Amino acid sequence: MLMSRRPLIMLILLVAAPMTIWFALIQGSLDIGAAQLWQSLRGNADHATAYQVIHELRLPRALSAFAVGGLLALSGALLQVLLRNPLADPYVLGISGGAAVAALLSMLGGLGIGWIRGNAFLGALASMMLVFGLSRLGAAWTHNRLLLTGVVMAAGWGALISLILALAPSAQVQSMLFWLIGDMSYSTQPGMALLALMGGLAVSLWLARALNLLLRGENTTAALGENPVYLRFVIYLVASLLTAMAVTLAGSVGFVGLVIPHLLRLLGGSDHRFLLPACVLLGGGFLTVADTLARSWTAPVPLPVGVITALLGVPVFLFLLVRSR
């Protein structure tokens, strides 16, 4: 029954994903009709204001939101296999904590948005290497050891974040909190994130058979010709890099990487040949809609997109979870 659902679910997601981008482009303080939008997308600048709003504001932000949602959902699906833990999400290993500390210190130093993003990416990479190195120090590597190391590192980064917020001038605290909750306001260059998403999806699909085997246990994986140690390292590396790119672009957007893979497993099963591309489409579309609502519901005052993802996603997930039982 699950296999018969998968083509239908994938077809729905393939149709819905462009519609979420379309929804993001027409929603906002400036009303843009379908005809104006189509002409602007074709490069017709007769309506100068609409053309500028679409190409300089809404389209880059919508593509950035789609990329971040896809990155987080894909990373969450990989980490849940790696750690064999349904509570695993892109932030459980402390990667976002390292990025947050680096970004907040950059804000505290008055650096520009480019420096903030660059330092956030370096902070995420440093945290990734630190967690992986400590989890292998003095003992054999296991998924439980990696998980515990990541949780402890995340707690340490959380303490540093609290210290920075306590010492920061009041004028900077709001922008810091927005970044911590998730903010797409400055996401105007989606190119690198989209490339990272496509590359991550390609590598993940290449590993899809091995991921299916890993769900059955490492002994089964090894018996069927895969190297579990190498596979764990590749999964950790890919998931960490995807998370680092997402955090760099949008801050710590919660919920997406934790729940989107679970929703799709409830609907279509755990075959990663289906699950991975479906996570990209559903995660990207979901965050695009959430970000559009975040900037338009209370305009001109924006909301952090992480608030909207939780408000929209939690009831839907609980409903599906109860139905599945």
Image (cartoon, rainbow, N blue to C red):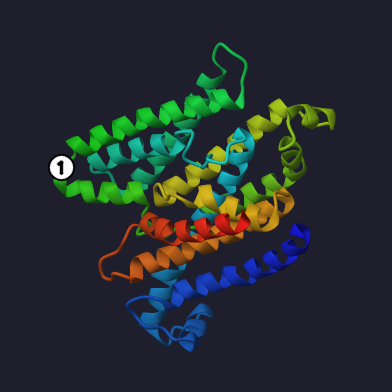
Residue 21 position (above or below residue 253): below
Residue furthest toward the right?
224
**Amino acid type of the residue that numbered disc 1 sits on in the rendered structure:** Pro
Residue 189 image-quadrant placement? bottom left
Residue at (43%, 49%) from the top-left corner? 254
Residue 273 picture location, percent across and down: 73, 51
Q: Quadrant of residue 58?
A: bottom left
Q: Position of residue 172 (x, y in %)?
A: 20, 47
Q: Residue at x 66, y 31 (%)?
A: 232
Instruction: Classify residue 277 as left or right of residue 30.
Output: right
Of the pair 70 and 286, the residue shown nearer to us: 286
Q: Nearer the viewer, residue 303 or 107?
A: 303
Q: Residue placed at 55% from the left, 26% from the top?
A: 146
Residue 192 visible to the viewer: no
Q: Along the line of sight, which residue is nearer the eye, 278 or 127?
A: 278
Judge left or right: residue 106 versus residue 172: right
From the top left corner, tell me how far across and down residue 218 is, in percent. 73, 28
Furthest toward the left, the residue is: 170
User: In the image, is 23 to the left or to the right of 156?
Assistant: right
Q: Is any part of residue 78 visible from this angle?
A: yes
| Secondary structure under the numbered disc 1 in the rendered image | loop
* Residue at the (61%, 23%) spot, across then down: 142
Q: Which residue is mark 1?
A: 169
